[in-house]
Amino acid sequence: DDLRRIVDDFSKFARMPEPDRVQTDIAKVLRDALALQSVAAREVSFVEDIPKATVNFVCDATLMSQVFINLIKNAVEAIEARRNRGHVFEAVVKVQLTRGVDMIEIAISDTGIGLPQDRGQLFEPYVTTRDEGTGLGLSIVKKIVEEHDGTMHLDDAEFVDTKGHRGAKAVMIFKNMGDHEQTKRSEA
């Protein structure tokens, strides 16, 4: 079963579809992904800092939804891993979208187990910190982000508990491409 899961994940990674970019309300895509994951993880408090107004972004909504669901699910699993070690803490996942003049920043933070000291390889295929992980989730996420002309990095979360523990934070930055015609012209 483990081998089959690894092969399936690698197949998805190797044959990622070309993004079908259309103008999309990325705030709605992010809210929908958050709603889906919050139903599955009722023991976690979800903090939403997403504009209610439409945030236009030319992207493949299905692929971006996959990114958000994967990262929120990772945050919940990091909280579960910390709980499994016997820690008592407030379980929080914060999802934030900030729109600038020429960029969109999306950050997903948690109060979970945190990041390892050696973070350089976390985006490499088959590198995982979880017992049941295949090590392809973050590789796929990063590939999708880059295919949307974005950048992604992992950092310590802003959450700090009484013992000084910090969870993880995934940050994605995209050029603000709200005009589909403008995007077509810039690609030409």
Image (cartoon, grey):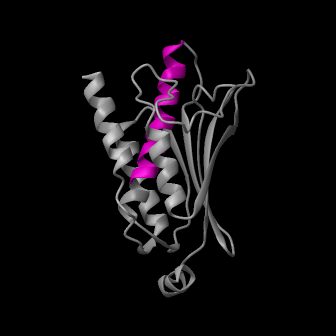
Drawn side of residue 1 relative to residue 132, left or right: left
Q: Is residue 98 magenta?
A: no
**Residue shown at 54%/57% (left/top)?**
146
**Position of the N terminus by quadrant:** top left
Q: Nearer the viewer, residue 124 or 30?
A: 124
Q: Position of residue 76 (x, y in %)?
A: 47, 34
Q: Is residue 112 above or below residue 123?
A: above
Q: Is residue 122 above or below residue 180?
A: above
Quarter occupied by residue 59 = bottom left
Can residue 34 be spotted in the picture? Answer: no
Q: Position of residue 26 (x, y in %)?
A: 48, 66
Q: Position of residue 56 (x, y in %)?
A: 51, 75
Q: Which residues are magenta?
A: 66-85
Drawn side of residue 163 relative to residue 139, left or right: right
Can residue 18 be spotted in the picture? Answer: yes
Image mark count: 0
Q: Magenta region's main secondary structure?
A: helix
**Residue shown at 39%/51% (left/top)?**
66
Quarter occupied by residue 82 = top right
Q: Nearer the viewer, residue 121 or 59?
A: 121
Drawn side of residue 29 relative to residue 75, left or right: left
Q: Position of residue 145 (x, y in %)?
A: 52, 56
**Residue shown at 25%/28% (left/top)?**
4
Q: Is residue 79 magenta?
A: yes
Q: Nearer the viewer, residue 78 or 90?
A: 78
